[in-house]
Amino acid sequence: MNSQSEPAVTRWDLRGGVEARSGNFAPPSLTGGRTRQVARSRRLIDLRRFQLARIVVQRADAQQNRDRIITAAQLILAGDVDAPLDLVIQAAGVARTTFFRHFPDRKALLAALVEREMDELEVEASRFAGNPNGLHLLLAAKVHRFCAHSHFIDYWMGVDRSDEVVVRAEARARAALDPFVAHAKSMGLCRPDLKAEDIVLCGRMLGGALLSCAPSDRMDIGKRTTELILRGIARYAPGEGE
């Protein structure tokens, strides 16, 4: 019995391709076009991934350069807030164009130093969280920072209090201090009318005391000033402080 093969019948599928009931035939032009399109899409995806990876690396390098500049500024400006910026550039090991890309002038650099100080305050606040004496420890750490970074004192005491950098920094300081003040008040360790704003004010008082003395005397003066401040914010007996 002779069998006769069934002729191939083609039809369009829902994806726009061609499929055959027998022979699995599709026109070469359509198949080749789709293959080229897929290959082109893959190349574009690979290129985009490469571009994104390069952007990530560039941003990481830029952040590293910025951190190096700020760290160098902390060292160079510690003794003289008006020291030449070329010394900072040299200590950071970056090109002048890189430096001025991050910090167009001295004010921008000093503002970054203030931000670094606030970062360190928040780190210390996290470290002392839950400690019954956290408020005192935080103030002691503030004295140490003030004495170690005299540039911060010179800038902080001379800048306009309405300056955006100061306003933002003091807001961060109050936010970091609020939980410690609330805890000290709840434990009866400080006067009941104490507020985080008062601690910020104490910081200004401390800065004024340190600014008026020689750098070699700042640690001793800072400790003494802090002792007096702590006595001032301590809980007073009924009838006192009225």
Image: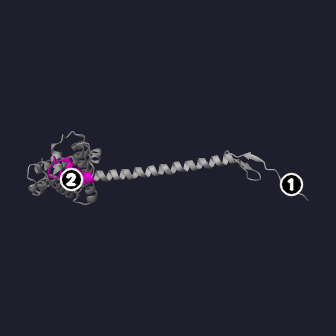
Closer to us: 40 or 235? 40
Q: What type of secondary structure mainly makes up the magenta span?
A: helix
Q: What residue type is labelled 2?
A: Gln
Instruction: Give the magenta range.
Output: 68-93
Q: Which residue is drawn at 12% across and 57% down?
A: 219
User: Which quarter of the figure has residue 131?
Assistant: bottom left
Q: Distance between the residues labelled 2 and 1?
A: 92 Å
Give the image location of residue 53, x and y in percent. Answer: 43, 52
Q: Residue at x 24, y 46 (%)?
A: 109
Q: Name the residue under label 1.
A: 4
* Left or right, 207 with reference to 102: left
Give the image location of residue 194, x and y in percent. Answer: 19, 49
Q: Name the residue under label 2.
A: 74
Q: At numbered mark 1, what does the secondary structure look like: helix, strand or loop? A: loop
Q: How many marks?
A: 2
Closer to us: 87 or 198? 87
Q: Is residue 44 magenta?
A: no
State how the image is colored.
one colour
* Left or right, 180 with reference to 9: left
Q: Is residue 87 magenta?
A: yes
Q: Is residue 194 visible?
A: no
